[in-house]
Amino acid sequence: MNKVLFIDNDTMTHLHHKIIMESFVVSHYDVDAVFEQSSLVALQSISSQGPEQLPKLIFIDLYIPNFTAKGFVDAYAKISYSIPNIIILNSTRFIEDMTPWIEHHLVLDVKPKPLTLPYLSSWIGIP
């Protein structure tokens, strides 16, 4: 099963992604969607699992409070075996906010939120 993890403290964005995943993806494909509002809780959960249980994709809000996206990515790098599978989500259009992430070895993409079904489908590998 492919695990996809969404980390965002914005309730409306979570709801949007959850509806898309549950309505169009999870019901038709072998995908387990996990939604977490805290990057620290998500990291603790990931850390307690073996490498075969790492999410196929992680979508994380750039500006998540407390344990930031940068803190999460840095900590995740220590347990991920350098598998690039993180997509940074942001609600800003300022290029300087996105630039540091474009070259990060674990980051696949930087994308404005909310995500669309075609975008999610392209990364999850479904038609």
Image: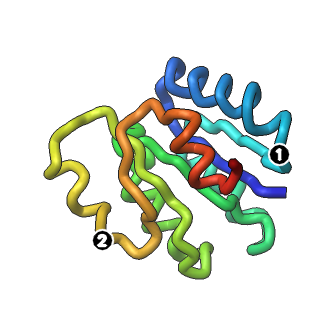
- For the point 63% across and 38% down, the residue is 36
- For the point 41% across and 43% down, the residue is 89
Between 117 and 70, the one lying in front of the other is 117
Report helix, strand or loop for mark 2.
loop
Residue 18 x/y as whole percent: 66, 28
Residue 28 x/y as whole percent: 84, 38
Task: Tell which circle, 1 or 2, labels the residue nearer the N-terminal end.
Answer: 1
Q: CA distance from mark 1 to mark 2?
A: 31 Å
Between 35 and 111, the one lying in front of the other is 111
Residue type highlighted by circle 2: Glu
For discs 1 and 2, the disc positioned in front in the rendered view: 1
Q: Which mark is residue 29?
A: 1
In this rendering, would 46 be left or right of 64?
right
Q: How many other residues sit within 10 Å of disc 2, few (<14), some (14-19) or many (≥20)?
A: few
Between 58 and 23, the one lying in front of the other is 23
Number of numbered callouts drawn: 2
**Residue 78 location, quadrant:** bottom right
**Residue 66 location, quadrant:** top left
Q: Which mark is residue 103?
A: 2
Q: What is the residue that sits farthest to the bottom in this orientation?
A: 81
- For the point 48% across and 46% down, the residue is 60
Residue type highlighted by circle 1: Tyr
Using the image, determine if residue 56 lies above or below residue 16.
below
Report helix, strand or loop for mark 1.
loop
Using the image, determine if residue 39 lies above or below residue 55.
above
Residue 53 x/y as whole percent: 79, 65
